[in-house]
Structures are given as C-alpha cells and as structure tokens.
C-alpha cells in the first residue's frame, strides 16, 4: 500500500498540471471578447476581404472559424499564412488550393488575444445568424394562419342581415304600390320640373349674350390669340425633351458617385475624352468597386445577374450573362453631328456645361434643351483658349486676328455653318 501511495503522489502533480493547462486553454477560447473582436475586425481592415456569411475576396469566416477549435492555429494563420503554406500545413494548403493560391496578407501586429477576440466575435455573429434562419420558417408558418373564426362568422352575419333588410324593403315597396294603385299624385300641368325651368333660363341668357356683337367679337379674338400662342409653343417645343428623366433598370445615384465620392465623369464615360460618343460604361467598370463594396444591395445584384457573376464563388458564367437595357436620355436627331472629344478635349468644356450639375442629381435628367438655337448661342458667347491648342493654332484664317488680340468665337471659325452639325 505504501508503494501505491508513493506512485500516486509521483503522478498526481503532472496530471493536475495537465488538467490546469487544459482548463486554461478552454477558458482562453471562451474568454475572447466579442465586442473588442468586432472593433478589431473592422479597424484591422478584415472587412475589405471577408464577411461573416458571404464569400468575397476571401472565404466566409462564419463556417470556418465556428468549426475550427484551435485558436492557436488561427493565430498562426493570421500572423503568417504563407509560412504555414510553405510548411505544408494541411489546413493552410487546403484553404490556399480552394482559393486558387490567393495570398492572404500577414498581420503580425495582431496579438493572440486580438485573434481570440475576432474569433469570439465571428462565432457569436455566426450563431446569431443561424438561430435567426432556424426561427424564420416557424415565423412564416405562424403568420400564415389565415382569417380568424370571429372574422368569418362576422362576415356571414353581415350577409344574412343585408339579405333580411332587402326582403323587408321589397315588402314595403310592394305595399306602397298597392296603396297608390297606379294613380298620379300631381296633375299634368304641374309636372314641369325645376331642371327644365333652369334650362329654359340658361338658354334665354345665352341668346341674350349672343346678341351682343362686341362681346362675341372680343371672345373670338381672345380665343384666336390663345389658340395661336398654344400652337406656336407646341410647335416650337416639338422634339425638345428638356427635363426628360426616364426610370432606368438600375438605380445609379450620380450624387453619391460624382458628388460625395468625387469620381471623375471620364472614369465611367471614358469615350467623352477620346471619341465622338461619351459611351455607356461597361459593367466591368462597376465591378472594379462593387465586387467588394455594397455587395448586399439589390441594385448591385442586378449587375451580378447581368454579368452572370456568382458572389458566393466569385466566378463568371458567360451563359447567364445578358445586357442591361439602359434608356438613352440625351437624344440628338440623326442629321445632327456632335463630337464629345472635340468639345471636351479640344474645347476644354466641362461636362456640367451641357449636362448640368450631375453631381447633385439622384437620377440624371436632360438639363439643357439641346436645340440648334442653344448650340449657336453657346458658340457665339464662348471664348476660345488659343494657348497650347494645336487645333486652333493651325487656323491660319484667323491668324491675323489673334495677333491683334481680337477675341475669336466658334461662330467666326465656322461654328454656325450648316455643315458643322448637319451631314
């Protein structure tokens, strides 16, 4: 017995130490602060590549971290993912292979405690999402219980009551008809209704007004002027669509992109600087940002559907791609020629001069009338900047005027000739 007691004492200390270390390990995982983890998750820039439940540039973190019980391995991955891959770590190699060898940047500045906090935040948020999904079907069934019995019986009672009232009224009408016996209550001479008398008075008044020739002439004269003015305005504004604002298939807020975000117009409409047309932006230009930004927006998902893009796998399926049916806002007649690059690059005109303050528009509309008169007035009053402009420096016809310091306008350079716009 004494030997057994000695053996137990020898092994008791190591066993107790192992138990203490295990408890400390589990408590370290449980002690992660979810609130601090959320703050660290956002401040460290994790949101640029990861979300809890949606795959972005990196994987969705919820399923991975919730199933991963080794916080020490998570910390090693965050500190130096490439080192784990180079060491042929099975988990690291699997993640790298799944994402085509994409490199995750290292975060040596994050401590093991920071990683534990982030893991606690991800696990808590993922659990909340799963619980909400589990409760959703039950809630849907509960809300679809149909009308209550009280409402059904109430409607039946209203129908029965209405039927009884109709029967009683029919009885009353039949009784009154029997009492009257079909006799007239008033003599025929007294059957002149009030409406007929009023109509007679109106006709008499109208006849009296028509006998006044001066009044009739004045009414006809004013009517002719009013109709002529209306006809002139209608003909003058034919095919002028100033203020035209169609509903586009995707809501694109210019006030957010061009106003708040200060994105240059040529970033999307690149053709305005180098070609005749300003061009409709390619959806791939949108994906430069919206592959990561605002991925939950229904309007952004319209872009995904048009490109055949699956945000869960970050892959394109060309068989599902289809064009967006944008509605043109600024339309010129086919016989009118307008070159964007000539005005934007050569003339140095700002986009807002023709299209208005697009940086303040929630939805773009036609700001200017785009009539020939409007174009000619602009050509007459706009001064040309000759300095460093090869196009105008080659205009030998006005060379003498430039030397004398005389202001030159587009009209003097042939800007109001028919062939400048019509062909």
Image (tube, rainbow, N blue to C red):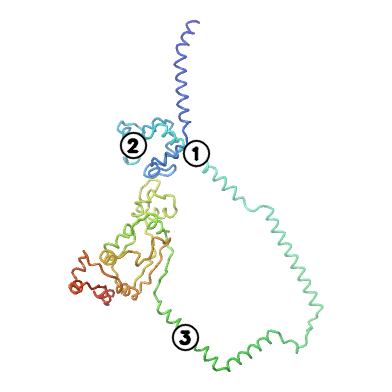
Looking at the image, tell me whether mark 3 or mark 2 is earlier in sequence order: 2
Residue 367 point in image, percent of width and height: 39, 68
Residue tagged 3: 225
Closer to us: mark 1 or mark 2?
A: 2
Residue 270 point in image, percent of width and height: 30, 59
Closer to us: mark 1 or mark 3?
A: 3
Query: Could you tell whether 394 is left or right of 353 in the image?
Result: left
Looking at the image, tell me whether mark 1 or mark 2 is earlier in sequence order: 2
Check disc 3: other Cα within 10 Å, few if <14, some if 14-19, many if 20+. Answer: few
Residue tagged 2: 106
User: Could you tell me which residue is drawn at 61 percent across and 92 percent down?
Assistant: 208
Q: Secondary structure at mark 2?
A: loop
Task: Please identify the quarter of the rendering in which residue 344 is found.
Answer: bottom left
Q: Which mark is residue 127?
A: 1
Query: Mark 1 near mark 2, Cβ–Cβ under 8 Å?
Result: no
User: Could you tell me which residue is drawn at 33 percent across and 57 percent down?
Assistant: 264
Residue 171 point in image, percent of width and height: 78, 71
């Amino acid at each position: 017995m004494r030997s057994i007691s000695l053996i137990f004492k020898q092994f008791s200390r190591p066993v107790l130490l192992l138990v203490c270390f295990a408890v400390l390990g589990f408590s370290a995982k449980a002690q992660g602060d979810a609130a601090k983890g959320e703050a660290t998750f956002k401040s460290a820039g994790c949101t640029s590549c990861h979300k809890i439940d949606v795959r972005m540039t990196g994987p969705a973190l919820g399923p991975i971290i919730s199933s991963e019980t080794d916080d020490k391995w998570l910390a090693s991955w965050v500190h130096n993912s490439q080192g784990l891959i180079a060491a042929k770590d099975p988990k690291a190699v699997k993640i790298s292979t799944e994402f085509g060898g994409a490199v995750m940047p290292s975060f040596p500045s994050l401590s093991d405690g920071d990683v534990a906090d982030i893991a606690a935040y991800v696990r808590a948020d993922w659990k909340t999402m799963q619980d909400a999904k589990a409760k959703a079907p039950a809630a849907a069934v509960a809300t679809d219980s149909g009308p209550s019995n009280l409402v059904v019986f109430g409607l039946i009672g209203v129908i029965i009551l209405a039927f009884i009232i109709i029967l009683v009224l029919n009885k009353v009408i039949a009784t009154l008809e029997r009492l009257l016996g079909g006799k007239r209550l008033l003599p025929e001479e007294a059957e002149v209704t009030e409406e007929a008398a009023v109509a007679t008075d109106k006709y008499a008044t109208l006849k009296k007004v028509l006998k006044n020739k001066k009044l009739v002439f004045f009414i006809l004269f004013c009517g002719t002027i009013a109709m002529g003015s209306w006809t002139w305005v209608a003909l003058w504004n034919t095919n002028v669509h100033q203020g035209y604002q169609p509903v586009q298939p995707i809501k694109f807020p210019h006030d957010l992109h061009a106003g708040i975000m200060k994105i240059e117009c040529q970033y999307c409409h690149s053709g305005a600087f180098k070609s005749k047309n300003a061009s409709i932006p390619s959806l791939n230009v949108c994906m430069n940002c919206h592959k990561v930004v605002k991925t939950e927006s229904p309007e952004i998902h319209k872009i995904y559907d048009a490109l055949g893009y699956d945000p869960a796998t970050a892959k394109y399926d060309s068989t599902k791609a289809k064009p967006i049916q944008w509605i043109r806002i600024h339309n010129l007649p086919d016989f009118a020629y307008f070159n964007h690059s000539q005005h934007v690059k050569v003339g140095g005109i700002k986009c807002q001069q023709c299209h208005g303050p697009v940086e303040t528009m929630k939805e773009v509309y036609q700001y200017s009338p785009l009539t020939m008169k409007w174009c000619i007035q602009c050509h007459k009053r706009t001064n040309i900047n000759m300095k460093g402009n090869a196009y105008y420096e080659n205009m030998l016809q006005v060379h003498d005027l430039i030397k004398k310091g005389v202001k030159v306008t587009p009209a003097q350079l042939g800007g109001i000739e028919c062939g400048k716009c019509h062909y």
